[in-house]
Amino acid sequence: MARLFNIEVFNQSISGDGGSPGVYYTSPEQMAVLGSADALIVQIIVESVGALSTQVTVAYESSNTGSQIANEWGNVATATTGAAVNWSDLPLVKPLTITTVGQIGAFGRFKVTSNNNAPAQVRIQGERI
């Protein structure tokens, strides 16, 4: 596989309160770049948490329109970090490989949520198969 790009698509604090998690999306400026790859290798990194039960979920969504209308996006793959049992478990790192050729549309975005407050990073490597 040939590497097309290696970028950080998300790096910010997420606000969540267990009952109503915050929902964040990667920048619309990255949609065409994310959709250009045949495969994505994703790394989710959480360096600190407000509570040990914190989990961060990242879902890759794909669309052929790039519209902001929610029902035009389909979920392709999802990964959730494990919760830290001890503070020494940090940072939490979760890999996700997306190679579902044919399910990745022309545009892509990541939906990032958490059950508690946490700063999260999402780094992507895009590849051509």
Image (spheres, rainbow, N blue to C red):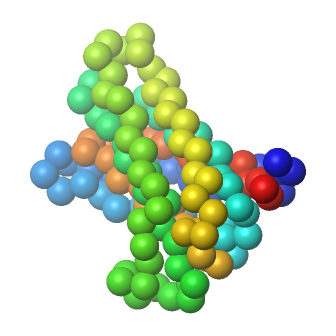
Name which residue lies at 35% across and 53% down: 113
Q: Residue furthest left?
A: 19
With respect to residue 107, does 15 lie above or below?
above
Report whether residue 73 is seen. yes
Closest to the observer: 5 or 99? 99
Percent x, y for residue 79?
42, 45
With respect to residue 75, does 69 lie above or below?
below
Q: Residue furthest front?
A: 102
Name which residue lies at 82% across and 48% down: 1
Name which residue lies at 63% across and 63% down: 101
Closest to the observer: 116 or 97? 97
User: Quarter of the image containing the C terminus?
Assistant: bottom right
Closest to the observer: 49 or 113? 113
Question: Is 60 left or right of 23, judged from the image as shown?
Answer: right
Tell me which corner region of the image, top left, top right, bottom left or bottom right, holds residue 29: bottom right
Question: Is 87 left or right of 110, judged from the image as shown?
Answer: left
Percent x, y for residue 69?
41, 87
Percent x, y for residue 49?
36, 31
Name which residue lies at 40% across and 35% down: 81
With respect to residue 123, does 100 lie above or below?
below
Report whether residue 7 is seen. no
Percent x, y for residue 109?
54, 67
With respect to residue 87, does 66 lie above or below?
below
**How many marks on residues?**
0
